[in-house]
């Protein structure tokens, strides 16, 4: 197979890297952590089990307006409007952690490990894929991702929300 466009490389990477099927909610175990895809959370998330309505929830790291926090998303199959997490791989039982900060730090460490491994994978792809122009873009993207995660680790997770435009507008309207 020849790989002449970025789309060709994307397809090959998806076939090698991302499973075609995701895990059914019935297979998700509370206390286990998963590699998946969410709209607003990290690709590593801990299953917290069913919510009050029986929908399977996942807790992952989210950064918004400078604040790092745990955020919950519902399994994709449990809610056609708000189900946004799609788990691909059960990575086993997450350690027991007492605080939100511990959970955030642990998820960050998992994300760093994943980013390091993925960067090595991209660096050592088959030669025919490495020779494509898009490979360099993918390599830079993975390097940037790892650098960003390492920066968060170095600076520390933040619980300080930054000022937003909405905050400014609200303050202006109060006067």
Image (tube, grey):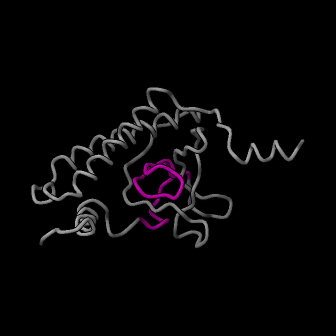
Indicate whether residue 29 is drawn in magenta: yes
Residue pushed farthest left?
127
Q: In this view, does 171 lie above or below 79?
A: above
Residue at 44% over, 63% down: 27
Q: In this view, does 113 lie above or below 130?
A: above
| Residue closer to the observer: 113 or 7 | 7
Q: Position of residue 116 (x, y in %)?
A: 29, 40
The magenta span reads 23-48
Q: Place residue 101 in its image quadrant.
A: top right
Q: Residue 4 versus residue 128: which sits nearer the camera?
A: 4
- Image quarter in which the C terminus is found: top right
Does 175 sit left or right of 140 as displayed? right
The residue depicted at 68 percent of the width and 43 percent of the height is: 164
Is the residue 30 above or below the residue 167 in the image?
below
- Left or right placement of residue 30 versus residue 141 in this view: right
| Residue 172 percent location from the top left of the image | 82, 44
User: Which quadrant would the N terminus be assigned to in this image?
Assistant: bottom left
Q: Which residue appears at 39% of the width and 33% of the height?
A: 150
Q: Which residue is drawn at 26% across and 44% down?
A: 119
**Residue 166 rendering spot, x and y as whole percentages:** 73, 48
Locate residue 8, reporting x and y percent. 23, 69
Residue 175 within the magenta-colored segment of the rendering: no
Q: Residue furthest right?
A: 175
């Amino acid at each position: 197979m020849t790989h002449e466009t970025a789309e060709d490389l994307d397809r090959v990477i998806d076939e090698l890297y991302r499973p075609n099927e995701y895990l059914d909610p019935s297979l998700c175990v509370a206390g286990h952590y998963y590699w998946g895809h969410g709209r607003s959370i990290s690709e590593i998330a801990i299953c917290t089990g069913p919510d009050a309505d029986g929908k399977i929830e996942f807790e992952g790291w989210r950064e918004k307006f400078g604040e790092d926090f745990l955020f919950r998303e519902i399994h994709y199959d449990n809610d056609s409007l708000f189900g946004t997490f799609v788990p691909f791989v059960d990575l086993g039982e997450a350690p027991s952690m007492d605080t939100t900060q511990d959970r955030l730090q642990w998820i960050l460490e998992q994300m760093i490990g994943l980013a390091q491994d993925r960067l090595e994978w991209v660096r050592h792809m088959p030669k025919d894929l490495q020779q494509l122009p898009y490979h360099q873009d993918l390599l830079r993207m993975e390097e940037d991702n790892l650098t960003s995660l390492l920066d968060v680790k170095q600076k520390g997770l933040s619980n300080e929300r930054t000022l937003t435009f909405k905050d400014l507008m609200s303050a202006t309207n109060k006067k």
